[in-house]
């Protein structure tokens, strides 16, 4: 049996054009996210919209070497989903709050069967980063009654406790797996695939889960920017964002201070105010205390005394 090679290189637009010209006589129909594909007797060449060029087959290495130096294979593997994936019945999962000092870490897994894809798009579901907070809240209310989903929330006290023995990546993996496995349990049909908005390499993700009892691993795909690859991830992201916003409102009300999002200077200042008022222990219930913001806020609180 022949060992099939697989090489990926990144090329400038000019170099891509030169390559396309060279292989034009062998052109075939390109797959999704690709602008050109060619099939020679010993190699399949695919030029992706991202500028990545994949060489597959017996002559992959020698052909690729004519054009450039290979990039790490994992980069290519993560962004390549089967053809037609965006029309499949898919469970998507995404997390929110990982970079926010205040507030929980929220993971949502959401199921969009193929017959509901158009409806979900119709509700306004798209990349959550392009939506305002009020839009997120409105769309989440509609999604709540339209599709099955499951959330897993790590509130700050639990988050801080877990953080003592594991990385944020491991906590995130455990929470994704918990949300996915609970959602799969309540679905009446088996989805075609599961797509996780990639926060860790697949191997690392499963290493994090090695002590979990139920590990979801059938038909699982990982991709960065997965919100754009299937509407189920975009829906999961919007739901997670909405739950996060709701928690932030709740926490703000509890402490009597509007807690800023993110992890910037405003966050340091708000934390310093709370330390001066309530003491540093107050942060355990509302913030991810391992962030550098804690030390900065302690310093600030002492300066302004
Ligand atoms: Mn994400």
Image (tube, rainbow, N blue to C red):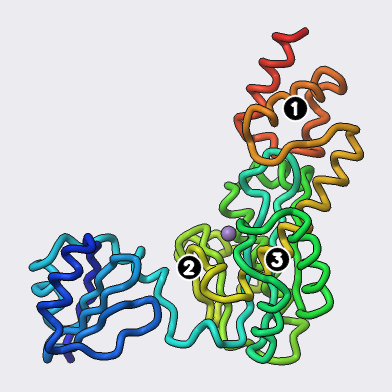
Q: Residue tagged by mark 3?
A: 108
**Residue matched to label 1:** 271
> Marks 1 and 3, Cα distance to the nearest angstrom?
28 Å
Label 1 crowd (10 A; few <14 / some 14-19 / many >=20): many
Q: Secondary structure at mark 1?
A: helix
Whether residue 214 sits left or right of residue 76 in the image: it is: right
Front residue of 99 and 137 = 137
Tell me the quarter of the image containing the C terminus. Answer: top right
Query: In the rendered image, which quarter is residue 197 located in?
Result: bottom right
Residue name at image x 83 percent, y 21 percent: 279
Q: Secondary structure at mark 2?
A: strand
What is the crowding at mark 2: few (fewer than 14 residues within 10 Å), some, or many (at least 20)? many
Residue at image location 26% in from the left, 80% down from the top:
36
Residue found at x 70% / y 78%: 122
Name the residue carrying label 2. Answer: 223
Q: CA distance from mark 2 to mark 3?
A: 16 Å
Q: Position of residue 288 (x, y in %)?
A: 70, 39
Residue 207 drawn at (x, y percent): 51, 62
């Amino acid at each position: 049996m022949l060992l099939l090679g697989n090489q990926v290189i990144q090329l400038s637009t000019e170099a891509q054009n030169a390559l396309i010209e060279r292989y034009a006589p062998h052109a075939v129909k390109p797959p999704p996210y690709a602008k050109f594909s060619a099939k020679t007797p010993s190699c399949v060449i695919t030029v992706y919209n991202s500028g990545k060029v994949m060489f597959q087959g017996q002559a992959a290495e020698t052909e690729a070497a004519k054009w450039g130096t290979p990039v790490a294979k994992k980069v290519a593997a993560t962004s390549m989903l089967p053809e037609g994936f965006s029309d499949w019945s898919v469970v998507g999962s995404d997390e929110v709050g990982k970079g926010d000092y205040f507030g929980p870490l929220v993971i949502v897994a959401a199921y969009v069967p193929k017959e509901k894809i158009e409806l979900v798009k119709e509700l306004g579901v798209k990349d959550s980063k392009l939506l305002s907070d009020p839009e997120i809240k409105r769309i989440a209310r509609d999604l709540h009654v339209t599709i099955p989903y499951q959330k897993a929330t790590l509130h700050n006290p639990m988050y801080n406790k877990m953080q003592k023995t594991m990385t944020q990546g491991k906590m995130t993996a455990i929470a994704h797996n918990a949300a996915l496995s609970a959602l799969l349990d309540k679905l009446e049909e088996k989805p075609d695939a599961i797509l996780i908005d990639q926060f860790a390499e697949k191997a690392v993700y499963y290493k994090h889960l090695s002590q979990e009892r139920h590990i979801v691993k059938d038909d699982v795909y990982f991709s960065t920017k997965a919100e754009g690859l299937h509407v189920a991830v975009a829906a999961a992201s919007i739901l997670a964002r909405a739950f996060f916003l709701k928690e932030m409102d709740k926490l703000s009300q509890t402490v009597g201070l509007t807690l800023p999002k993110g992890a910037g200077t405003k966050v340091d200042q708000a934390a310093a105010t709370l330390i001066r008022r309530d003491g540093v222990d107050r942060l355990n219930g509302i913030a991810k205390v391992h962030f550098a913001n804690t030390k900065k806020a302690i310093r600030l609180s002492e300066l302004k005394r």
